[in-house]
Amino acid sequence: MSNVQSTSLKRRLGPARRLTGPRRVIAEVVGSAKDHPDAAEIHRRAAERDPQISLSTVYRTLRLFAEVGLIEQHSFEGSRTRVERAPTAHHDHLIDMETGRIIEFKSQEIEQLQTEIAERLGYQLTGHRLELYGRPLSRPKRAPGAKPKA
Amino acid sequence: MSNVQSTSLKRRLGPARRLTGPRRVIAEVVGSAKDHPDAAEIHRRAAERDPQISLSTVYRTLRLFAEVGLIEQHSFEGSRTRVERAPTAHHDHLIDMETGRIIEFKSQEIEQLQTEIAERLGYQLTGHRLELYGRPLSRPKRAPGAKPKA
DNA sequence: TCCCTTGTTGCGAATAATATGCAATAAGGC
DNA sequence: GCCTTATTGCATATTATTCGCAACAAGGGA
């Protein structure tokens, strides 16, 4: 049952906002996505469950979800705005230029340097965007079970 | 004289491309811009010199200039795609959220970390985007009378 | 449970930014 | 100067996202 999810979703929305069918569906779609879908893709997936959900509603709902902190929206170079469910811990992205796959990473050092740079320039850092674009090294796949060299 | 500039522009364009009036004008506009104008602004400035240059031509020309490495195009959050003439040395940007001003900076440490992270994830870094968003710490109020040099 | 208020939806049309088809024009090699 | 053909200007198309509005439905109250 999605009772627990609906409950927290409702809490997120607050008293002035209603927990509607479309919102429930869209929340499930973004909540269960393993990738970073765009609005059109979310609409497609939502339509599988309820074909009459409109694209406008998807856009409106995504904006709402972003406002209440349920998701984050990113616009990477060359592609439409993509969505991911609100990360528990901040991270940045590396985009695989060959497959379009998005890999998450974090670097405390870079975060620290960003803050320092901003301060040195006389600014308080309020946000940032860091994206790496790359293509896979022609390193062969790891044998199953083999641990990566950290 | 803009002979020297026209010459290098012509070289940049190569033999198959023509050095036309509009291109000359747009090249001068972006070449002399101290800020990071968007297409519409470039069109405005170009129109001061030649009012019949069309916006389409501005877009086409900017794309061309980017292809031949004459300029770089950036799309910062919340604003249209902006242009800067090709930097001699790579740098990233800090966007002043209060004024919209763009400040350039560079950090060899961050660049280094980016490469390391990409490699650790199995990628060769082919590009990146780093933008800092912030607001001024304390008004670096200039003493009255002390004007910045134009 | 039914009602009533009002937030929400679906639809189509509206924007905003950028791209494109095409006939007219103009570089620039000869 | 001429001729080929890249380039332009104009209007129109695209793409991604938003908005207006009448119909609808969530959910607190009687």
Image (spheres, coloured by chain):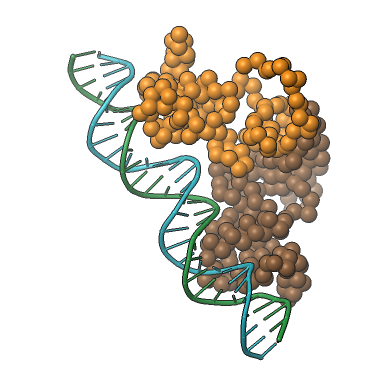
Chain colours: A brown, B orange, C cyan, D green
Tell whether D9 sits left or right of A78: left
For the C terminus of chain A, the image quarter is top right
Tell whether A61 sits left or right of A91: left
Of the pair B58 and A90, the residue shown nearer to us = B58
Which of the 4 quarters of the picture holds residue D6?
A: top left
Numbered-mark total = 0
Question: Is residue B14 at all visible to an observer of this figure?
Answer: no
Q: Is residue C7 above or below residue A71?
A: below
Location of residue B90 in the rendering, given as x and y in whole percent from the top left corner: 65, 25
Tell whether A110 sits left or right of D3: right
Of the pair B72 and A10, the residue shown nearer to us = A10
Residue at the image point whose x is 68% and y is 17% from the top: B147
Residue at the image point whose x is 56% and y is 46% from the top: A79
Location of residue A28 in the rendering, given as x and y in whole percent from the top left corner: 67, 66
Q: Farthest top residue?
A: B1
Tell whether A74 sits left or right of A150: left
For the N terminus of chain A, the image quarter is bottom right
Residue at the image point whose x is 69% and y is 41% from the top: A129
Residue at the image point whose x is 57% and y is 29% from the top: B36
Q: In this view, does C8 lie above or below B57?
A: below
Question: Is residue B97 at all visible to an observer of this figure?
Answer: yes
Location of residue A36 in the rendering, given as x and y in whole percent from the top left corner: 64, 54
Which of the 4 quarters of the picture holds residue B137?
A: top right
